[in-house]
C-alpha cells in the first residue's frame, strides 16, 4: 500500500486503506457544516475501507432523515469474500481472492445480498480478514483437489466463514418489524438513490465512463465532470445535509465518508471525513482533507441524486 507524500495533505494526515493514521485538527479550525455520524468503527489491517466508507455514508444520510441505522460491515464483507471464493472455484484456481474494491460496489452488494444491522451480525473478536482470505483460498483449493462440485465447495467455504465470523441470521428484526435481508437493504438504500461522479482528465467530459481502476470488479460507471464541478457538488450536498462518499486516487488507496467542511485560521478549506481507523487518535476518528487535494486526487465520489425523494423510513 502506498502512502501519501504530497505536501497538500501531509500536514494533516497520511491516508492508506491499510492504515497508518497520523494527523491533527488544523489550527483554529471552524466547521461550516458538520453532519451527525454513527459510532466510529475500526477496519483493523483489512483493505475494506471501501465497505466501511459507503456504509458510513448511508448511515449519516439516515441520521439526517431521523432514522438511526448502524449497518454490518462483516455481513457485506462475508458475502463479497464468498463471491470471491466461488469465482476462484469456477476459474479452477486462477482467480486470486482479494478483498480490495471500490466504494460504489457496496450499492451493488446491497442489491445482490441485502443488508444486516450491525448488532445483528458482527464478530465479537477482531477479524484479520487478510488471514481469513488465505484460509478461504486454501479451502477452495482443497475442493478443487478433491473434485468437489460447486455446492459442496460452497458448503465448505460457508463453514469457514461461520467459524471465523459467525452464523448468519436469516431475517432482520428491527423496531418490531421483520424483514428479509433484501427488504432491509431496500429500506436503507435503493438502487437509484445515489450516483457516482469522477473527474479524470484523460476521459471525455460530461460522459458516463467505466472507472478505469484495477479494483473496479463490477465495472462501475460514473459521470466524468470537471474537477471544479466535482468540488461544488460535494459542497452543495453537504450544505443540503447529505454526506458524500470520497475515494481517493490510486496513490491514496483509501475511501471515507465526507460529513462536513470548514477552514483553519489561515483560510485554508478542508473537508471533514469519518474514517475507519477507530477513534484512538488525535482527531478522534475524523480526517481533515484539504479541498485542493480532493480536487486533484479523486477516483470517485458517491452523492445523493438530486431528484431522489425517499418517502418511506424504517418502520418504528
Image (cartoon, grey):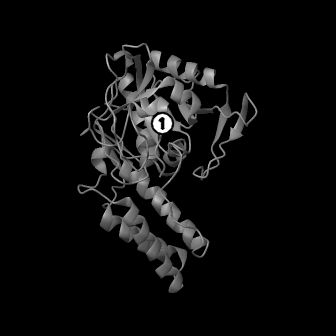
In this view, the residue in front, 46 or 253, is 253
Residue, x 52% and y 50% (percent of image)? Answer: 101
In this view, the residue in front, 175 or 286, is 286
Residue 51 visible in image: yes
In this view, the residue in front, 284 or 28, is 28
Q: Total of numbered circles in the picture? A: 1
In this view, the residue in front, 100 or 36, is 100
Q: Is residue 75 left or right of residue 39?
A: right
Residue, x 56% and y 40% (percent of image)? Answer: 249
Residue picked out by circle 1: 189
Is 241 placed above or below 312 here? above
The quadrant where residue 274 appears: top left
Residue, x 48% and y 32% (percent of image)? Answer: 7
At which x and y percent is residue 36? 33, 25
Q: Is residue 66 left or right of residue 198?
A: left
The quadrant where residue 243 appears: top left
Residue, x 46% and y 23% (percent of image)? Answer: 242
At which x and y percent is residue 306? 57, 21
Badge 1 crowding class, 10 Å Cα cut-off, few under 14, some 14 to 19, many 20 or more, is many
Amino acid at each position: 500500500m502506498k502512502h501519501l507524500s504530497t505536501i497538500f495533505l501531509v500536514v494533516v494526515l497520511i491516508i492508506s486503506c491499510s492504515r497508518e493514521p497520523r494527523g491533527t485538527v488544523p489550527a483554529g479550525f471552524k466547521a461550516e457544516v458538520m453532519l451527525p455520524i454513527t459510532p466510529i468503527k475500526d477496519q483493523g489491517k483489512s483493505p475494506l475501507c471501501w465497505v466501511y466508507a459507503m456504509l458510513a455514508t448511508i448511515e449519516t444520510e439516515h441520521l439526517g432523515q431521523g432514522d438511526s441505522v448502524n449497518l454490518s460491515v462483516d455481513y457485506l464483507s462475508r458475502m463479497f469474500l464468498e463471491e470471491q471464493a466461488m469465482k476462484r472455484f469456477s476459474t479452477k484456481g486462477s482467480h486470486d481472492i482479494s478483498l480490495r474494491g471500490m466504494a460504489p460496489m457496496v450499492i451493488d452488494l446491497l442489491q445482490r445480498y441485502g443488508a444486516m444491522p450491525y448488532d445483528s451480525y458482527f464478530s465479537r473478536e477482531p477479524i484479520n480478514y487478510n488471514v481469513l482470505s488465505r484460509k478461504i483460498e486454501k479451502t477452495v483449493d482443497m475442493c478443487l483437489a478433491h473434485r468437489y462440485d460447486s455446492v459442496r465447495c460452497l458448503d465448505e467455504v460457508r463453514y469457514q466463514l461461520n467459524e471465523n465470523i459467525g452464523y448468519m441470521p436469516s431475517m432482520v428484526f428491527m423496531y418490531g418489524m421483520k424483514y428479509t435481508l433484501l427488504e432491509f437493504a431496500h429500506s436503507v438504500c435503493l438502487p437509484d438513490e445515489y450516483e457516482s461522479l469522477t473527474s479524470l482528465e484523460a476521459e471525455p467530459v460530461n460522459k458516463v465512463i467505466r472507472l478505469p481502476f484495477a479494483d473496479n470488479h463490477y465495472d462501475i460507471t460514473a459521470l466524468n465532470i470537471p474537477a471544479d464541478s466535482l468540488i461544488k457538488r460535494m459542497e452543495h450536498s453537504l450544505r443540503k445535509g447529505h454526506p458524500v462518499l470520497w475515494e481517493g486516487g490510486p496513490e491514496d488507496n483509501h475511501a471515507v465518508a465526507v460529513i462536513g467542511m470548514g477552514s483553519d485560521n489561515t483560510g485554508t478549506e478542508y473537508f471533514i471525513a469519518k474514517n475507519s481507523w477507530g477513534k484512538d487518535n488525535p482527531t478522534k476518528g475524523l480526517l481533515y482533507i484539504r479541498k485542493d487535494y480532493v480536487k486533484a486526487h479523486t477516483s470517485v465520489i458517491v452523492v445523493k441524486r438530486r431528484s431522489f425523494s425517499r418517502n418511506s423510513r424504517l418502520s418504528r
